[in-house]
Amino acid sequence: MRPDLTALRDAFHGDVVSAYDPGFEAVRVLFNTRIRTRPAVLCRCADTDDVVTAIRFARDAGLPVAVRGGGHHASGLSLVDQGLVIDVGGLRDVAFDRDAAEVTVGAGAGWREIDRHTYAEGLAAPGGECPTVSNAGFSLGGGYGLLSRTFGLGCDHIVEAEVVDAGGRVLRVTEDEHADLLWALRGAGGAGLGVVTKLRYRLDPVPNPMVGGFISWPIDQAAAVLRMYRDLYADRDDDRLSLCLLLSADPEPGISLYGMYVGPPAEAAEALAPVRSFGTPSMDTFGELSYSDLMQALGEEIPYGLQSRWTGGYFRGQGPDDDAIGVMLDAFARMPSAYSMIRFDLLAGGAVVRVPADATAFVHRSAMHYVSVISLWQEDTDTAANVAWADDLAGALRPHLTGEVYQNYADTGLADWAGAYYGANYPRLQQVKRRYDPDDFFHHAQSIRLPA
C-alpha cells in the first residue's frame, strides 16, 4: 500500500522522493550498483529538523527506516525495502575554528570539502580517500586514513556529535553529556543508535608540502613486493610512513604502493629508501606535494557505477606469510574481472594502537594489516562468477585471518558479525542501545541487538 506522504512533504525542507516519483532510481542507487533494494520513500534532509520530521513520520506510519550518508555502504544496509530512508548526505556545512584547531561539519560533508577549509591553515583530520564518502559514515565506523598511523583514527578525533534519537530528541553528545553514547559513536555509529547530523573534530598539524605518491612494479615482482611491504612495518617505531598496497589489473596487472611520509620532506628520503630502491619499479611518482593534492589524486582513481562484492579481514601477527601471499597471487591470476582488486588498505600501529581497545567502541587496535578482496564488475550475467571469486579467496585466506572484520566494510555474509565487528565491546554497546533506542526503532540486519 502506498503511504500518504502529504503531511511529510508539507513539513519537510528538503526533498521527499517516493518510488512513484520521476528520478527515484537515480536517487536510490548506491555506490555498489548490485544493491537493488527499493525503499518506499527517500527523505533527503536539508537540516536537523528534517531528520526529526522523518523519524516521527516513520514512527506514525509504521515504516522501517535506514540511514544513508554518502551511499557507499558496501552491503547496502543504508537502504531498506519498502521503508523510509533518512538521507543526511545534503548536510554539508563546514565551520572551521582555527584558534581551537577544530572543525564542525554536517554529516554529509566529504573529506575534500573539509580539507579545503582546514588544510590551508596547515590542519587536517584523518580522512578517507574517496571524495564521495561522507565524513560521518567514515568516522563513525572507525575511520582509517593515511594520517591515522601518525595521528589516530577518524573516530578518535570526534569531540562532539549532534544526534537525533529514536524518539526524535536532538541530543548534544560530548564527554560531559551522554558520554556513553559518544563512546559508542566512536566506532559503532552506524549500528542503530540514532541519526548523527553533525560532528565536531579536533585537527592535527599536517605538513605542507609533504612527500607522497605512487610506486608500481610489474606483476612478476608481486610476491617479493608483498614480503617487503609486510616486513617494512614489523617493529617499526616511526609512525610517519603511511603506505597502502594494491594488486590491480586495470590498465594492466601490477602491484602498487601509494601514500606519504607525514613529516618534513627532508626526512622522507631515508624513510622511503627501502621502498623506492626495491626491485625494478615500472613507475615512481613520489615527490613533494600537498596532502590535499595527493588525496584528490587518489580519489580520481576510484571507479564508479560498478557492482561489487567486498570481503576480507585482519591478518594474524605481522601480516601475510608466504602461504597467504601464494593464495592471493594465485587467485589474482584467475580474476574474472579486470576491475577487481586485492588491497592492503589499512594500517594500525602508531597512534591507532596507543588507544586502549575499550576506550572507544572501535576494538581493532592491534592488528597491523587488513586485506580487502574487492570484486567489481558491470553486467548482471557476470555476478555469479565474480561473487564466487571473492568468496572463494576469502575462504582460502580465513586460516590466516583473526576473524575480526572492519565494520565500515560490512559483510552481510558474516555469521557472527557482532563478534567480528565489536568483539568484547559488544555487550556494552547493547546497554547503550537499550538506553537510546529501547524499542529497536533503528533496526537493520547488523544493528546492535537489545540485550535479553
Image (spheres, rainbow, N blue to C red):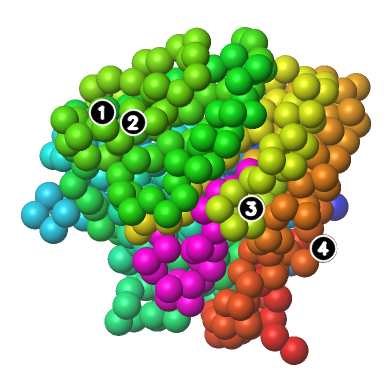
Asked if residue 71 can be seen in this view, the reply is: yes
What residue would you read off at disc 1? 269
Measure the C-alpha gap from mark 1 to mark 4.
46 Å
The local secondary structure at tag 3 comes to: loop
Q: Which three-letter amino acid code belongs to the residue tagged 1? A: Ala
Residue 95 lies, in percent from the top left, at 23, 48
Q: Among all residues in the image, which is located at the extreme bottom? A: 452
User: Which mark's residue is nearer the viewer, 4 or 3?
Assistant: 3
Report the magenta residues as a range.
352-371
Among numbered discs 2 and 4, the one appearing first in the sequence? 2
Name which residue lies at 76% across and 61% down.
445
- Is residue 22 left or right of 297 when viewed as pictured? right
The local secondary structure at tag 1 comes to: helix
Measure the C-alpha gap from mark 2 to mark 4.
41 Å
Residue 173 lies, in percent from the top left, at 37, 73
Residue 355: in magenta span: yes
The local secondary structure at tag 4 comes to: loop
What residue would you read off at disc 4? 415
Measure the C-alpha gap from mark 3 to mark 2.
24 Å
> For residue 315, which numbered disc appears in the image?
3
